[in-house]
Amino acid sequence: MLYAIMESDLHTLSVMNMLVKYADDTNLLVPSDSDVDLIEEFHFVQQWAEENRMVINIAKTKEIVFKRPNPRLHIAPLPITDVQQVSTAKLLGVTLCEILRFDVHVGNVLKMCSQRVYLLKLLRDQGLPRPQLNIVFDALVLSRLRYAVHVWSGFMSVELKGQVNSFLKRVFKCGFCSKLHTIEAIADDADTDLFRKMANPLHCLHSLLPPVKSCNHDLRPKGHIYELPRCDSEMHKKSFVSRCLFKYL
């Protein structure tokens, strides 16, 4: 909390750029058409850290350049000196890829879940009843699949969904869970729950919702009262807020 207060005066040089802060994790976002480039923004952050007698861990600082999967013309920006430029980076437990696909993240999640299934196998072999196995499965495996599923579930390909569902079908056949789960059902339940909570004006994500629709007619009840956004790309429509606005129309 003290660090969050100390960092509250750190800002970007350009209003087009953005600083995303969470605890002691700080992320700088600079679009390609910004009037202040990444290097200048990063030097400003370094200057702020020096004035506040703080040290940036350069070894842990990474730079990732997001781009379209098949760009016709891609001009890579100049890298920041002494900062490693990577193709994937982990942000708060979610692995982001430079082309904004989540194959690596899903692969990492399935690998971790498979390791935890081994523990379930040991508990089953030692005689742990099925109801208790289901509780442990929810705590160790389902919780990992549900983590930040709002972020990446909308961008999953049919192949990725098939991989996750095959894993869930396998653990169900082994008797580790009481019912057969699917990634579609897990994601839909998570979307419904978070979207409902966002309607509260006090919720931290409420500001991401579009304005309320202005209509004087008494129409049939709708799933929500917000205006539909104009999605200029398929990726925009697949993002959490846009996805929910169209899904629960």
Image (cartoon, helix red, strand yellow):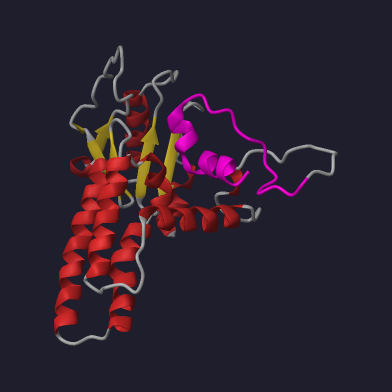
Is residue 235 a member of the stretch shown in magenta? yes
Position of 99 with respect to 234 (left or right) is: left
Q: Position of residue 110 (x, y in %)?
A: 23, 55
Q: Is residue 219 above or below residue 172?
A: above
Q: Is residue 32 above or below residue 111?
A: above
Q: Quadrant of residue 116?
A: bottom left
Q: Position of residue 16 (x, y in %)?
A: 49, 26
Q: Position of residue 8 (x, y in %)?
A: 48, 47
Residue at the image point whose x is 20% and y is 74% from the top: 120
The one nearer the camera, 45 or 28, is 28
Is residue 93 a member of the stretch shown in magenta? no
- Residue 244 visible (yes or no): yes
- Magenta stretch? 220-249
Q: Quadrant of residue 131?
A: bottom left
Q: Quadrant of the C terminus?
A: top right
Q: Position of residue 71 (x, y in %)?
A: 31, 17
Residue at the image point whose x is 43% and y is 42% from the top: 20
Q: Is residue 234 above or below residue 203?
A: above
The one nearer the camera, 173 or 38, is 173
Residue at the image point whose x is 28% and y is 61% from the top: 168
Residue at the image point whose x is 33% and y is 51% from the top: 92
Q: Quadrant of residue 35?
A: top left
Position of 28 with respect to 207 (left or right) is: left
